[in-house]
Amino acid sequence: MAEIVLGMWTTHGPILNTTPDEWMLRVINDKRIPHWFEGKQYSFEELVELRKHEDFTEQITLEERTLRHARCQEGVAVLAAAWKAVKPDVAVIMGNDQREVVLPSLQPMFTIYHGDTFWQKPLPEARAEKLPVGIKESEWAYRPEEDQVWPGLPALAERVLVKGQESGFDFAASSEWPEMGEGHHHIGTPHAFSWIIRRVMEDNPVPMLPVITNTFFPPNQPTAKRCFEMGELVGQCIKEWDNDLRVAVFGSGGMSHFTINENFDRDFMQALDDRDRDFLTSIPQNILMQGTSEMRNWVAAAGAVFDSGLKGSTVDYIPCYRSEAGTGTAQGFVVWQ
Ligand SMILES: [Fe+2]
């Protein structure tokens, strides 16, 4: 029977792929948008007032950002080294889409990619130029320099689709990334998957099953409980798979952003350590908003991995602040083997 031999939970955002100076480019956007924090929405100015007792002054100096940036790179290096050492045969990645291939016109809660292959290409210059500042600079970590075709994992995907039908999970199925129009900001594999291929697998991917969860966009973001159960179903499909393949499972995304909430992140890390199903399945919907919504991918991966014999721990947790409002992105890395 197939076996889960590696579980990894990792952030994947631009902070990991840009310089401490470039981190600050996103503050312009932070000031423009409303932010979710502890279940409520605030303007940037309201957050500054609300969180002034936390005083982020020291944490956003270039010196401190430089130290935290270095820890982020060390964390990614630990993941890449573990990947190389364990050498799984195939991988399942729990990830999400940010209007890359899933549009509001058709937005499934969960999509199983069952194609034989999936592709990625460099973004044409005209499209790259339109990317927001601070995002453009990080594109190298999501895209190859030349066109790539990677192997899918249709055999496992089809098992998940069928077992889903039998157990009340009505997955959407995708066999190919849609070709987006010229005006669209993205082509090919969504960032949650391509980042793992570029920076953890270092461009040497194994056959992979991308599971796309609509973490971000109302009105149909799945509950944490549903994500965990979906992960359990995928875990069962792996266990019952009649071959001797060694499987890696990834949770890709998070942690809290664009308002960092260290209490939530640390409680979440503790819940992983404790295999605490109750905590993970009861995270309220209004906590899993904006970038923090990607923690649904971590919950789904936990659903698949908790029942394995794997053990592990947190590699690092690094809250990467960039403003006096406590905005930024918290980075985290966990490896079980
Ligand atoms: Fe993301």
Image: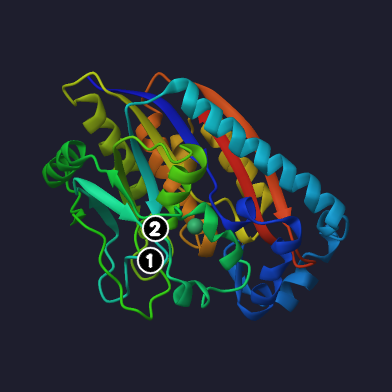
Q: Kindly identify the amino acid type of the residue bearing the numbered disc 2.
A: Pro
Name which residue lies at 55% across and 27% down.
81
Q: Is 289 displayed left or right of 308 in the figure?
A: right
In which quadrant will I find the N terminus?
Answer: top left
Give residue 190's mark: 2
Classify mark 2 as within 8 Å of ligand 1 or not, answering yes or no: no
- Crowding near the residue tagged with mark 2, few <14, some 14–19, many ≥20 C-alpha atoms within 10 Å: many
Q: Kindly identify the amino acid type of the residue bearing the numbered disc 1.
A: Glu
Give residue 100's mark: 1
The x and y percentages for residue 51 are: 78, 64
Classify mark 1 as within 8 Å of ligand 1 or not, answering yes or no: no
The x and y percentages for residue 134 are: 63, 67
Callout 2 secondary element = loop
Count of numbered circles in the view: 2
Query: Residue 156 lies in what quarter of the image?
Result: top left
Q: Does residue 197 sit above or below 141 in this rendering?
A: above
- Crowding near the residue tagged with mark 1, few <14, some 14–19, many ≥20 C-alpha atoms within 10 Å: some
Name which residue lies at 86% across and 58% down.
61
The x and y percentages for residue 196 are: 46, 44
Q: CA distance from mark 2 to mark 1?
A: 6 Å
Residue 336 seen in this snapshot: no
The x and y percentages for residue 2 are: 25, 22
Model colouring: rainbow
Q: Does residue 280 sit above or below 144 in this rendering?
A: above
Give residue 62's mark: none
Query: Residue 40 lies in what quarter of the image?
Result: bottom right
